[in-house]
Image: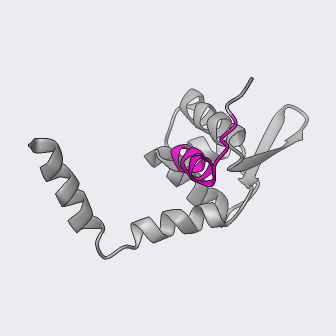
């Protein structure tokens, strides 16, 4: 039986874990710009291997971040909700991102 988060915080953490990988963030950003991309389209744009792209798409689909529409043997992926990209944009656009990353790196070094 798949994991079913119960509290609001567990649900939020579950979704954030689905976003928390650089390639997944890139995939979501590409799907924001161009909905309905195939694995091959994403491979070409990201210069990534098919197995890696497929793996991340499967994880994101299971978490409800993307949806797939089948046409014959091909699947075309789109965002399930624009707000997932908004979360990424907020993190990336933060003026404090470098400062936060610097603090985190210093914390790991101690």
Left or right, 50 with reference to 23: right
Task: Give the quadrant of the C terminus.
Answer: top left
Observer-nearest residue: 13 or 54?
A: 13
What residue occupies the far top of the structure in this picture?
1
Left or right, 4 with reference to 13: right
Left or right, 89 with reference to 101: right
The residue that appears at 21% across and 67% down in the rendered structure is: 99
Up the image or down, 71 lies above or below 32; here it is: above
Q: Position of residue 104 (x, y in %)?
A: 22, 53
Answer with the quarter of the image where residue 1 lies.
top right
101 is within the stretch colored magenta: no
The magenta stretch spans which residues?
A: 4-17
Main SS type for the magenta part? helix
Q: Position of residue 79 (x, y in %)?
A: 71, 56
Figure colour scheme: one colour
The residue that appears at 64% across and 66% down in the rendered structure is: 83
Q: Position of residue 2 (x, y in %)?
A: 71, 28
The residue that appears at 58% across and 63% down in the rendered structure is: 85
Up the image or down, 71 lies above or below 19; here it is: above
Observer-nearest residue: 104 or 86?
A: 104
What residue occupies the far left of the structure in this picture?
110
5 is within the stretch colored magenta: yes
Q: Position of residue 95 (x, y in %)?
A: 31, 76
The residue that appears at 57% across and 60% down in the rendered structure is: 29
Observer-nearest residue: 3 or 46?
A: 3
* Count of numbered circles in the view: 0
């Amino acid at each position: 039986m798949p994991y079913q988060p119960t509290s609001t915080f567990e649900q939020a953490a579950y979704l954030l874990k689905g976003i928390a990988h650089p390639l997944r963030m890139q995939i979501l950003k590409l799907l924001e710009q161009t909905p309905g991309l195939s694995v091959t389209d994403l491979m070409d744009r990201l210069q990534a291997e098919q197995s890696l792209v497929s793996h991340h798409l499967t994880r994101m689909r299971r978490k409800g971040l993307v949806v797939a529409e089948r046409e014959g043997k091909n699947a075309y992926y789109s965002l399930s909700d624009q707000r997932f990209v908004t979360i990424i944009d907020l993190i990336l656009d933060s003026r404090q991102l470098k400062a936060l990353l610097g603090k985190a790196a210093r914390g790991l070094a101690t």
